[in-house]
Image: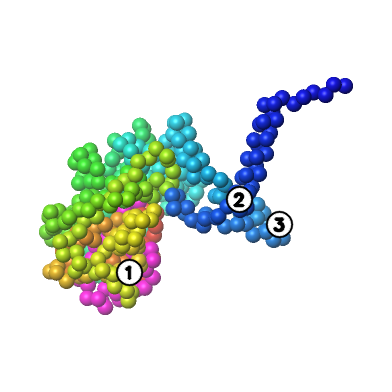
Amino acid sequence: MKKQKCPRGSVFAACVLILAIVVGDGWLIFAPKRSFSADENRMLEDPPNLTLDTLKDGSFMKSAGKYVGDHFMLRESFVKLNTSWQLLTGRRDLASDYSAEPAEGGVYFGRQGHIYEVLLPDTAGTFRRNAAALDGFAQKAGIPLTILPVPSGSQEQRQNLPDSAPNHDQCAELDTLKKGAGQNTSVADVFDALSLQKTGCDYYFKTDHHWTSRGAYVGYCALVKAMGLTPAPQTNFEYRRVSRPFYGSLYSKALYAAQQPDTMELPYRKDQASVTQQIGSVTHQGIYWEEYLKKKDKYSVYLGGNPAVTVIRCPSSKGGKLLLLKDSFANSMIPYLTENFSEIHMIDLRYYNLDIYKYIKQNGITQSAAVYSIKQLCDVSIANKLNR
């Protein structure tokens, strides 16, 4: 019987497949491993632990699958290629998880090079409890509280979203805060001031969920006016552009090779050298931590991130002491707020676990403000810290 020869094309394809398997396995075994992905801003899976118990309960196979998924060769290039393919095939909402409880929205790739958060309604009641707790804080503390709820970029720039893209309207949360504000509480409204349609100005980063330093100035003006103070003119500051490109938190959710980076500007006071930041017993000169400009998380150049408590001192300012309850949106407002307050006591309730009312008395604080993104107030509970 005459032997049939295998076609050369099949032999070549088999060789390529075998080579890919050998090289891929060799990469997983011998290549240097990373524990953190800077582009995706997350920890990567550790090597799986092989024991009888992990084999029996199936955790070894789950961990092995995640490990291979996080460490295979040219992974980030394939992730970017996948994003391009999804956009090419018409998918609008990337990196979402609607099976989670509560559901997690992803990101939209919008017009003008922007990436936007997909906003979902708060079905867990987190925002309602946080809003009530903030008003209750003002009554318990016995000092005036001014709340600045910051809308997301996808709220303020709806015309840049994909056509007919679903997006929750954050005006509902603003109305809840206004209606629930008691005698000691006021709410500053920046919706119109930040609106791209009404102002023609872009106050948000394209690859990050935060506002820019120019957007932070708009928020600062609204906050201090609501407190009965006069905002410092923008000409009091020198804006210096950061030389390194910035890819922010929204880019990390859906890596995309064609995405253009952001640029950052940092506002400096004329007497910037007099401003200090204290974290515990450590005093830092100024509010900028420039080492972060060499890292992925460049927004942490403000204050070095989000300490539980940090005190900003500016002796040249004539204003008094301000307690600032905050998330990271408030960090970029600090250069401006130092014009109105000699001391700013910033407390991040996500990490602060002591009695905030004792803190107010011990430090002689007579004014307070709360600067939070509306999305943060929908996602993270601060009510338990304020209701103590």
Would residue 8 appear left or right of 167 to someone viewing this image?
right
Distance of label 2 from label 1 (alpha carbons) = 42 Å
x then y, percent, for residue 85: 48, 34
Amino acid under label 1? Val
Q: Residue at x 44, y 34 (%)?
A: 87
Please name the residue that numbered disc 1 is placed on.
309
* Residue 186 among those drawn in magenta: no
Location of the C terminus (image quadrant): bottom left
Residue 28 has which mark? Answer: 2
x then y, percent, for residue 290: 31, 60
Residue 56 has which mark? Answer: 3
Nearer to us: label 2 or label 1: 2
Mark 3 neighbour density, 10 Å: few (under 14) some (14–19) many (20 or more): few
x then y, percent, for residue 228: 13, 60
Q: Nearer the viewer, residue 152 or 207?
A: 207
Amino acid under label 2? Leu
Amino acid under label 3? Lys
Q: Which quadrant would residue 131 be assigned to in this image? A: bottom left
Residue 24 has which mark? Answer: none
SS for dot 2? helix
Asked whether the residues under the numbered discs 3 and 2 touch, taking CB atoms below 8 Å apart as contact, a structural biologist would say: no
Distance of label 1 from label 3 (alpha carbons) = 46 Å
